[in-house]
């Protein structure tokens, strides 16, 4: 009998399945991503807070504002997906979509009359830089930077 005939053959179902990673073998539950755990909460008309839950946002805001300002957070709620995309966050300086900060004397930057542009080379060319981004983009940035419960934005700085 040849050596290969004595080998244990895999079942057909095992043979055609993709190999599982160590994490898939050891866990039965799918973990939430970090972005799903952090949310933006509107505390009032002027203030937004970054936290994991509404209770956490209100408690942290009360520490900052003081207990006598309880009426400032009575209409607190989580922002909807539409509000995250529609509400804008004003940046402190002009920024390109590639993340490059503005360098007014740099050869790759030019003023087009209404906004700064950053040169990305051929075939893309010049890309308009921006001074505002959506709340969702800012949320993603803060999560990548290591999010913590903190004020997210305010109209009164």
Image: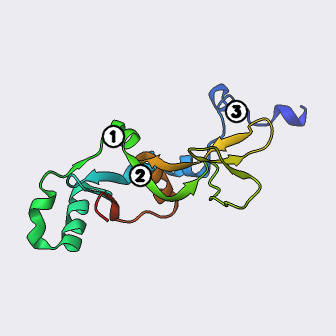
Residue at 62% x, 47% y is 21
> Would you say 74 lies left or right of 60 here?
left
Viewer-proximal residue, 106 or 123? 106
Viewer-proximal residue, 103 or 38? 103
Q: Determine the residue located farthest toward the right in the rendered image.
A: 2
Local secondary structure at mark 2:
strand
Mark closest to the chain's N terminus, 3 or 1? 3
Q: Indicate the position of residue 10 as horizontal and vertical percent values.
A: 70, 33
In the depicted structure, whether residue 92 falls above or below residue 67: above
Viewer-proximal residue, 116 or 8? 116
**Dot 2, crowdedness within 10 Å: few (<14), some or many (≥20)?**
some
Residue at 24% x, 68% y is 60
Viewer-proximal residue, 114 or 22? 114
**Dot 3, crowdedness within 10 Å: few (<14), some or many (≥20)?**
few
Mark closest to the chain's N terminus, 2 or 1? 1
The quarter of the displayed image where residue 49 is located: bottom left
Check disc 1 and report the residue beneath it: 83
> Would you say 18 lies left or right of 5 here?
left
Local secondary structure at mark 1:
helix
- Judged by depth in the image, the label closer to the viewer, 2 or 1, is 2
Q: Indicate the position of residue 123 as horizontal and vertical percent values.
A: 79, 35
Q: Indicate the position of residue 133 as horizontal and vertical percent values.
A: 47, 48
In the depicted structure, whether residue 82 falls above or below residue 12: below
Check disc 3 and report the residue beneath it: 10
Residue at 69% x, 30% y is 15
Check disc 2 and report the residue beneath it: 89
- Judged by depth in the image, the label closer to the viewer, 3 or 1, is 1
**Dot 1, crowdedness within 10 Å: few (<14), some or many (≥20)?**
some
The answer to whether the residue labelled 3 contacts the one labelled 1, judged by CB atoms less than 8 Å apart, is no
The quarter of the displayed image where residue 14 is located: top right
User: Does residue 139 show up?
Assistant: yes
CA–CA distance in space, label 2 to label 1: 12 Å
């Amino acid at each position: 009998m040849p050596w290969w005939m004595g080998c244990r053959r895999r079942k057909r179902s095992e043979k055609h399945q993709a190999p599982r990673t160590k994490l898939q073998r050891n866990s039965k539950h799918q973990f939430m991503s970090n972005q799903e755990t952090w949310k933006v909460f509107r505390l009032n008309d002027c203030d937004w807070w970054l936290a994991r839950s509404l209770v956490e946002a209100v408690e942290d805001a009360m520490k900052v504002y003081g207990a006598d300002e309880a009426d400032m957070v009575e209409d607190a709620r989580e922002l909807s997906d539409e509000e995250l995309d529609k509400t804008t966050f004003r940046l402190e300086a002009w920024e390109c979509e590639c993340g490059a900060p503005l360098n007014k004397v740099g050869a790759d930057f030019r003023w087009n009359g209404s906004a700064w542009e950053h040169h990305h080379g051929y075939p893309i060319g010049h890309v308009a830089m921006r001074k505002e981004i959506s709340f969702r983009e800012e949320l993603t940035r803060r999560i990548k930077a290591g999010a913590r419960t903190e004020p997210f934005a305010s109209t009164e700085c």
